Structure formats: C-alpha cells, structure tokens
Amino acid sequence: MNKYDRGIPHTTPRQSATFNQDVNSDIRRAAATGIYDIRGGGAKRKLPTFDDLLFLGASISRYPLEGYREKCDTNVTIGGLNAKNPIHLDIPITIAGMSFGALSGPAKEALGRGASEAGTSTTTGDGGMTQEERGHSSKLVYQYLPSRYGMNPNDLRKADAIEIVVGQGAKPGGGGMLLGQKISDRVAQMRNLPKGIDQRSACRHPDWTGPDDLEIKILELREITGWQVPIYVKVAGARPYYDTTLAIKAGADAIVLDGMQGGTAATQDVFIEHVGQPTLAIVRPAVKALQDLGMHRKVQLILSGGIRSGADVAKAMALGADAVAIGSAALIALGDNDPKWEAEYNKLGTTAGAYDDWHEGQDPAGITTQDPELMKRFDPIEGGRRLRNYLKVMTLEAQTIARACGKNHLHNLEPEDLVALTMEAAAMAQVPLAGTDWWPGKSGTF
Amino acid sequence: MQNYDLANGSLRELNATLHAQNHNTNQTVWEIENPKGAHAIACGLDAPIEVTVKGSTGYYSAGMNQQATVNITGSAGPGVAENMMSGKVVIDGDASQYAGATGHGGLLVIKGNASSRCGISMKGINIVVHGSIGHMSAFMGQSGNLVVCGDAGDALGDSCYEARLFVRGSVKSLGADCEQKEMRTEHLEILKALLAESESDAKPEEFKRYGSARNLYNFNIDNAY
C-alpha cells in the first residue's frame, strides 16, 4: 500500500515557476530540432506598459473641456525643421513600416487605404515600394534599410518622407529575416535574390557607420531628393537618450523610437523577448534628449511598440511624443489572428490570438503570406475600411481623455496629467506613484 | 562644355543644376572644379550627361547615379557610386570604403585601389578595380560582377549570394560560404567585355572566379557560427 492509499495527506502537484509549461515546451522543441525558435510579433512576456499609468482628469484646479463639442485638435506636422514639404497629418497615429514580402500586396494596399482615409501616413518596409502601397497611400514614408532591397532613387523621390532604419524594437542589433516560403517570384525579383532561399537582411548599413557618417548620409539623401521631404531616423529602444541625441546631431527631422513590444515579421524568439526595453521605459529619456538639445517639438518624436488604444496614444503624447506608430495593432484591425479562423489556427497547432508563425507564409487570414490562395481571403477594401474605423476610434478615445484633462490639442497633454500604478511605471515614466508626489529617482538623473 | 566652380558656388546649387538636366539637354558635358573633398557631389543624377570632377571627392560622390558618366580625376571618399542604377563612374585614383555599395547596375571603374567593403551588398552593378581591394569586399553580394586586377583582402565574398567575383592576384581569405568556382566560357566573355570597357590590359585567363557555395541559402543549424 502506498502512502496515498494509507490516507496520508499529500501536497497539490505544483508546477515550477522556473520550469513552467512554456519553458518546458521551449526546451522540448529545442531538443527535438536543434535550432532556435523563429516567430513574428513583439515581446509576449509581461512588461510594464502604459496600462500602468492613469490620467487624473480635471478637478477643482483643472478645467475640463466639453466632451462632445469643444475643440480638441489632433493634427501634427512632421519634418518642418529642414524639409520644404513637411508631412501634415490629421491624426498623430501613423502606420509603422512593414515589408511587402512579410505582408501580401493586398495587405499593403489595405494599410494605404485605411491610413489615407484616416488622414495619416503609412510606411514601406524591407523590400522596397509596391505600386499597391504607393497608389493607395496619400502619404507614404519610404524606409531606407540596411539591406537596401528594392532601393532605388526613383521610388525615393516618390516618397513623402524617408525613414532611415537603424534599429527595430523587436530586435535591436538584428537584421530582418524572410524565410523561403515567402520568397515568391515577385518578392525575389524585387529583392534581387534567388527564389525560395531563407533571406537574412543585413543588421547594419553597408555604407555608413556611426553618427558622423549618418550626418553625411542624410546630406546625400537630402541632395538626391532636393531637400523636399523630411528624413526620419528609426531606432530601437535600446539607448534612447544617446540614440536620440546622436540622431538629432546627425540632422534627423524626426525620431521613430520603437520599444520591445513592437513587432517583427520574423526573428529569433530569444531576441524578441530578451533584447531591448519596454516602450514605457524609453519615451522619457528620448524626450529629455530632445529637450536638452532644445529640439523638443522641432524634431518630432514618433513612439511605437505595443500601442493599442487611444489611451496609449494619449499617454505617449502626455509623456512627450509628437505621434505614435502602430504595426501589430493595425494587422489585428485588418483581421490578423481573428477567431473566425480558429479551426485553421488549430490545424497549425495554435489558436487565434497566439498565431505568430508569420514567417511560414500560412496565415489563415491571408495577410502575412505570399500564397495566392490564402491572399484571396483578404479583401483590401474591407481591410482598409476596418483600419480607418480603428484609427478613428483610437483618435476619439485620445480626444476624450485630452478633453477630460482640459486640453484642446492632444499635444497639450503633459506628464502632470498622469500618475503611475506601480513603482516600476513611476520610475520609467517619471510621474508620481498614485497617491504620492514621488517617483523613484525623482531627485536624481538618468 | 559647362563649368561649375565649387569654390564660388554651393553643393546644393551644383546638384540642383545637374538634376535639372534631362534627355533633351544640350548641356551634356560638365566640369566641376575645386571639389576639395566635398560630400555628395553629383549624386542622384538621372540624365545622359558626362560630368568630370577635377580633383578628389568626399563621401557618396555619384551616389544613386542613373544614366550619367561621372569621372573623378582624383580619389573618391567612402560610398562612391553607392546604389548606382546605371551609367558609368570612373575614378582615376583610389576609392575609400564601400565603393559601389548596393549598386543595382552600371559600371564603376577604380583605376587605383579600393578599400574595404568594395561592392558590399552589390545587386547587379559591375565593378572593375585596376588595383587591389580591402577586406570584406562583396559582403552579401547579390548579383553583378566584381573584377579585381590586383589582390583581395580578408573575407572576400562573405555570405554572398549570386555575385560573380573575379580576382587576378591573391585572395587573403574567403569569407563564409564563398568558394572558388569554375571559370567557364561565359565568364571569360564577361571579363573580356568588362576589362575592355574599363581600359584594363589584364587578360581574362589570368583571373580566378569566386562565388557562393550556397550552403547558407537555407537555415541549417550546422551552418550557424
């Protein structure tokens, strides 16, 4: 008779916090395959986020605006410092760079349609500019990436702004990745690569190193485009104070700062989860860099990485950003990870909301694929409409909060409007812990 | 011949003037004096004109060139003819790093030596170097031809795709996944044409060909470094 049969009390089977089911499955997968896990998306681990901040709203000492009637502007101008034609956006929510290759042509078209209808910009990605995207985007930002796939001066001159990509929040220090399943004839032709190879983009630019070179590269791009369009510099949220400082020094018109919740089409899971900083942690150092150089509101700060709602938009702007960019959220608005495809997600061994093997090209929603049959499932007109609606709701939500804080423009939101729910968030955002007038490091420096 | 003296003008005015030329221009020959190492000279050209820069240039001279012929009588700084699409760029002296980087087309001729990363990420450009080239040249080279009449430095053709690399002299070392390849008739024909067009007296038969071993084309953990 064993001890249980003898009626001896026993402890509840206990899972290890260290070797939990996720960890164990990672170990089993690694042991079976001998290669690291590659996936899309951003960090999935729990991180301090904008959810850890709250707005205070108006009170006796603060005067609110009427929620439905009084004016609360949302427009933003990007790149007025040097460009003859800065970008004027109706809303401060832009669409982040995502490549044709990672996304289908119709998905790029939908992003252009939705962004244009909402009065904002969309952005190309690794692989060059497609006609679908240029044709349907009233304002298109052209990414200038280390790989230079598809880069040519004709497309450069068609752009409304140029974004020099130095880093990406999901993988600071890493290059892109597009596996063979998605290197179709068209993608291969655009990138000048053999069809079907597992393509790895360069992690650093081929013809410049360091901020002094970057300054000259920016000069070259301005000369080629006649100083007409703004030049952004996109950096991962690794060393936001110094990277912002150096990008400004190099002559950037705008800084795009991407936290680790920002998505990627494909990279190593260990990279996504263990390199970079949360979006909440990077905005204040970047704003301080702008302020220290007297460039806040002159060089615009566009924050990205896990922005989901109007509340996130408002919080980013209250902390000093001029605008935000969304990528993963835009894909969800288009229909990515929609439960209506649950049966098909199950066939791929996953579930709606968790599907992240975008690199495999089998996306049931037909968005992150180059498979002609899967692509037929996605309607770019309907997708564009959904994105427009989503952007509209985010804007209305941000306006609702701004009015409650007594602000007649989203740009007038300020850190003073916020408190933090946790010590970590208070330290990162440098706003008081709720119920106090203190945050960690308040009297110190970065 | 049109003349522009950078000692009395500005880079912006010079490039704007050159950009204003089109297929119908009758101002087809230009001479630029006093470059004095200025950056981004004659970048972004897109017309069948011939521009001669009398002296040495800084970064990104003739960058993204299309159609034009650009001659540099001195030496060129980093990134000369980067991302060239078509046309021809000829440097009488030496070229610094990243010469012809990411170029999609056209011909870059360097009559002296080229520094490191010559032809990095090349995407169809033809590059002929009369002298030698530095380390990491043709890194991730995708297509096009790199012809080196002298020697090549370390890690030639590292992680290259389908770029063809021809070296007459020694190669200090080959990069990851780069190997010596068979020299076939079609390669000799390519060499013959490029050497003639770049005014080199080297003989095609004196060269060896290098290219991708194609072992890194698909993920395989055993290829990880």
Image (cartoon, coloured by chain):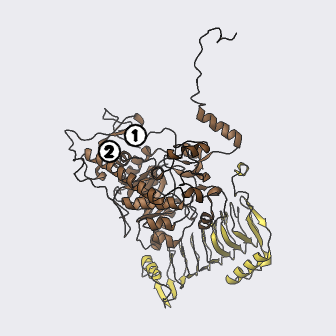
From the viewer's perspective, is A34 left or right of B85? right
Residue A60 visible somewhere in the drawing: yes
Name above or below for residue A192 compared with residue A294: below
Badge 2 amino acid? Pro
- Residue tagged 2: A415
Chain corresponding to brown in the figure: A
Quadrant of the rendered image containing residue B50: bottom right
Q: Chain of mark 2?
A: A
Residue drawn at (58%, 78%), measured in percent from left and top?
A: B86
Q: Chain of mark 1?
A: A
From the viewer's perspective, is B149 left or right of A9? right
Q: Residues within 10 Å of mark 2 (few under 14, many from 20)?
A: some
Question: Where residue A338 appears, x then y in whole percent?
Answer: 50, 47
Residue drawn at (47%, 39%), measured in percent from left and top?
A: A47
Chain corresponding to yellow in the figure: B
Q: Nearer the viewer, residue A208 or A41?
A: A41
- Residue tagged 1: A51
Nearest to viewer (mark 1 / mark 2): 1
Q: The residue tagged with tag 2: helix, strand or loop?
A: helix
